[in-house]
């Protein structure tokens, strides 16, 4: 279901969350290839294909989704990356090594039995190798002209320069046509090589350059700064016109503090809480937290023993955090620092190479094992599985005074994981908190059960690759 039909050439909005069309095509291709490979290999061994039950279909789908999670964790669906071809090939081999045992385990647990299991595994291996070869090629191939989007930036000031920089960095599928100056802009801050000729009208340039989208990135919107009639003509001819705040929301999955206004937040869509949403999210939290606690119980027992052996008790520690609507609650985590970590009574963020962290603590923080006891807070209702990370009262008071809209993140329950955690590295300063707030605002504005599932899938990838922990 597309949410209210919001659609651009390269971005699709599904249940309030923005996806790049190319990413969706890659995901559906991989999922379809795995399912078709499994079904063909099974049907070739069955005398009566009509007898294939829904168990086979559901098992095939489960395997396909599991392999997608592995590929996502290894970064195969990232639009921008800095990996070499050799590094991508190495990840493809790792994906194959993880996927084959997983497939074997899923079909061993399935009630469906095959006559020739070896032939099935060989067929599945061939399908996975084909999928991964295609994934390696797509990861490093230049997008075809039909998949590219031509963008014109209306403005030449600081905001226009910011949009141009982020476009080049965040979306390799975009061709930046250039910058068109507003009549009220006196001095340009963008490169003169990117400036479009003022002699031609905006409409003529858009048609001549075959522009797909115009981003309004003006530092000042006083009267006469925008040629409204020309912008309307462009829109009537099929060109998409968006403001800078919407552009960043769609492109980066964040609401940037330097481009948003209170009016945009108030009069725009989103920020829908609602009773039904609250009930569904609560039921989802209870079921998932219960299952995760059962699965994680052996890991938690081993972790507790290791903490005791290294530094004695206590195994857990409680710490005050700020939750929904500013309510204070105690969060519980495995102790990963020395017992005298804040003996001076001054709260401090953890930093890279922090000497307060124990040897066991360094491992469990890297693997996010220290967060597992927070599942009890989820069951208790103080936290959710997905949401903005809860912060300590000392830092909340400080950040609320220094960062605009910081208190907005307290309008939903804090989470064990969140959109900011899977999109940004560990925050250890006011500047980092401001960056993470931009992702938290996106989550609060657009949160749905679907976005929660996206965050949980990406969290698996973050844990697999050991990203962001300190």
Image (cartoon, rainbow, N blue to C red):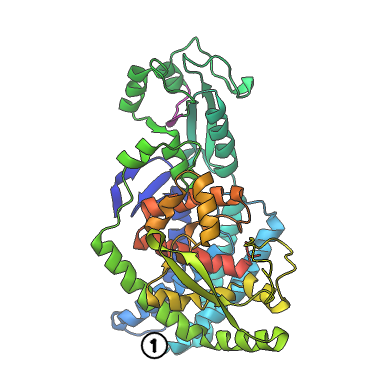
Q: Which of 90 and 316 is in front in this view?
A: 316
* Identity of the residue furthest to the top in this view: 199
Q: Is residue 233 above or below residue 8?
A: above
Residue 453 rendering spot, x and y as whole percentages: 41, 65
Range of magenta residues: 209-216
Residue at position x 47%, y 12% in the image:
200
Quarter residue 325 falls in: bottom left
Residue 119 rendering spot, x and y as whole percentages: 52, 83
Quarter of the image for the N terminus: give it. Answer: bottom left
Q: Which of 147 and 175 is in front in this view?
A: 175
Residue at position x 48%, y 23% in the image:
209
Q: Residues within 10 Å of mark 1 (few under 14, many from 20)?
A: few
Residue 326 rendering spot, x and y as whole percentages: 41, 59
Q: Is residue 246 above or below residue 118?
A: above
Q: Mark 1 points at which residue?
A: 112
Residue at position x 49%, y 62% in the image:
389
Residue 14 rendering spot, x and y as whole percentages: 35, 53
Q: In this view, does 426 lie above or below 253?
A: below
């Amino acid at each position: 279901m597309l949410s209210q039909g919001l659609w651009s050439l390269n971005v699709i909005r599904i249940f309030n969350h923005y996806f790049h069309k190319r990413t969706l095509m890659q995901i559906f291709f991989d999922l379809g290839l795995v399912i078709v490979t499994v079904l063909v290999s099974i049907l070739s061994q069955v005398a009566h294909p009509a007898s294939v039950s829904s168990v086979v279909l559901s098992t095939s789908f489960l395997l396909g989704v599991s392999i997608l999670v592995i590929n996502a964790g290894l970064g195969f669906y990232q639009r921008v990356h800095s990996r070499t071809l050799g590094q991508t090939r190495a990840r493809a081999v790792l994906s194959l090594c993880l996927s084959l045992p997983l497939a074997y385990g899923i079909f061993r647990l399935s009630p469906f039995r095959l006559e020739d299991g070896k032939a099935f595994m060989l067929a599945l291996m061939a399908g996975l190798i084909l999928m991964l070869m295609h994934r390696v090629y797509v990861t490093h191939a230049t997008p075809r002209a039909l998949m590219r989007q031509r963008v014109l930036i209306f403005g030449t000031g600081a905001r226009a320069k910011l949009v141009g920089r982020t476009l080049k960095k965040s979306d390799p599928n975009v061709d930046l046509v250039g910058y068109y100056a507003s009549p009220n802009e006196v001095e340009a801050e963008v490169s003169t090589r990117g400036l479009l000729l003022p002699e031609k009208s905006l409409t003529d340039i858009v048609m001549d350059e075959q522009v797909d989208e115009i981003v309004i990135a003006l530092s000042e919107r006083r009267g006469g700064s925008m040629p409204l009639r020309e912008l309307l003509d462009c829109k009537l001819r099929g060109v998409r016109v968006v403001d800078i705040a919407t552009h960043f929301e769609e492109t980066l999955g964040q609401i940037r503090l330097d481009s948003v206004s209170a009016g945009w937040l108030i009069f725009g869509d989103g920020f829908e809480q609602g009773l039904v949403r609250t009930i569904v999210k609560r039921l989802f939290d209870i079921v998932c937290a219960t299952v995760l606690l059962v699965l994680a119980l052996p890991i938690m027992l081993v972790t507790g023993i290791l903490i005791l052996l290294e530094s004695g008790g206590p195994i857990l520690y409680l710490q005050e955090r700020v939750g929904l609507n500013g309510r204070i609650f105690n969060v519980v985590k495995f102790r990963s620092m020395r017992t005298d970590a804040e003996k001076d009574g001054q709260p401090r963020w953890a930093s890279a190479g922090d000497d307060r962290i124990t040897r066991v603590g360094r491992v469990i923080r890297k693997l996010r094992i220290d967060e597992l006891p927070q599942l009890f807070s989820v069951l208790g209702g103080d936290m959710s599985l997905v949401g903005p990370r809860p912060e300590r009262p000392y830092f909340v008071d400080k950040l609320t005074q220094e960062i605009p809209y910081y208190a907005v993140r307290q309008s939903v329950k804090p989470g064990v994981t969140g959109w900011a955690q899977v999109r940004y590295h560990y925050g250890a300063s006011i500047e980092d908190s401001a960056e993470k707030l931009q992702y938290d605002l996106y989550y609060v504005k657009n949160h749905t059960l679907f976005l929660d599932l996206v965050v949980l899938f990406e969290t698996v990838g973050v844990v697999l690759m050991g990203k962001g922990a300190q």
